[in-house]
Image (cartoon, rainbow, N blue to C red):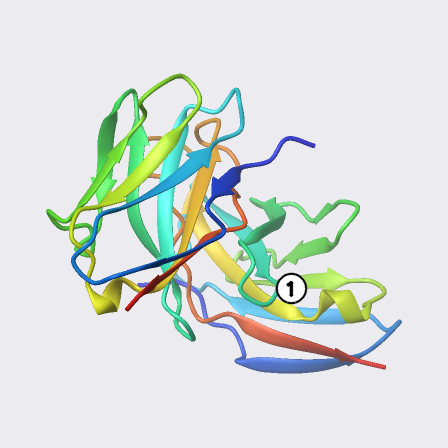
Amino acid sequence: DAKTTQPPSMDCAEGRAANLPCNHSTISGNEYVYWYRQIHSQGPQYIIHGLKNNETNEMASLIITEDRKSSTLILPHATLRDTAVYYCIVRPTQSYNTDKLIFGTGTRLQVFP
Amino acid sequence: EPEVTQTPSHQVTQMGQEVILRCVPISNHLYFYWYRQILGQKVEFLVSFYNNEISEKSEIFDDQFSVERPDGSNFTLKIRSTKLEDSAMYFCASSAGGNTIYFGEGSWLTVV
């Protein structure tokens, strides 16, 4: 079972920041937080991941709380193309042969004009 | 940017027929995966593969399923005798190991 909790759906106005929360209160010290998204039955697309520190790339920013029990994915300027289901997934850092991803139900983000 | 490619994008098959879904993982990756997603449901792990053998498989991956890496580039999923409930989108994925897993665009299988 997924070890994360996300709201089932969120709305965001185009051009505004989308802040997607995720709770992972049972996360272990050796587990990363990964974010993927799935646009209308396409393959899951990697967005960003982090362990303890906040991370930023060209797609998004990831803010992880100091106790690591929750995180927020930030899309700074949401566009209509960001409408998708967003998955927050915890995954061990150094498990190789069994490092599968376990998907939950995610958050359905709807960006509106 | 390197990507995982899958063929066919859509296949319709009759119940009881064998189906082979093909994938070309990212070239320097060593870990390969198949996932599936039944319409409207979660993305589910099927199997992981490394060093020419299955590393882990889920309960879904029963004797009707098999995987193979027949050459240095392809990774295939075979369903021996398809059932109606096998209708789903099948995603291939690959990783360099301990790192980010990248997914293909999927093969949509319809069993009639």
Q: Residue at x 27, y 22 (%)?
A: B52
Q: Residue furthest right?
A: A15
* Drawn side of residue B13 relative to residue B41, left or right: left
Query: Residue lying furthest top in this view?
Result: B72
Q: Nearer the viewer, residue A113 or B6?
A: B6
Kindly tell me whether residue A95 is visible in this rendering.
no
Q: Quadrant of the C terminus of chain B?
A: bottom left
Q: Nearer the viewer, residue A25 or B23?
A: B23
Q: Percent from the top left, x then y, of residue A71?
A: 60, 62
Please provide percent x and percent y for residue A97: 31, 32
B40 over B62 or under it: above or below: below
Answer whether residue B39 is visible to the viewer in this image.
yes
Q: Is residue A33 left or right of residue A58?
A: left
Residue linked to disc 1: A72
Q: Under tag 1, what secondary structure?
A: strand
Q: Chain of mark 1?
A: A
Residue at the spot 74% in from the left edge and 54% down from the top edge: A60
Q: Residues within 10 Å of mark 1 (few under 14, many from 20)?
A: some
Q: In x, y percent, where is residue B103?
A: 51, 45
Identify residue type, mark 1.
Answer: Thr
In this picture, residue A21 sits left or right of residue B112: right
Q: Is residue A39 above or below residue B63?
A: below
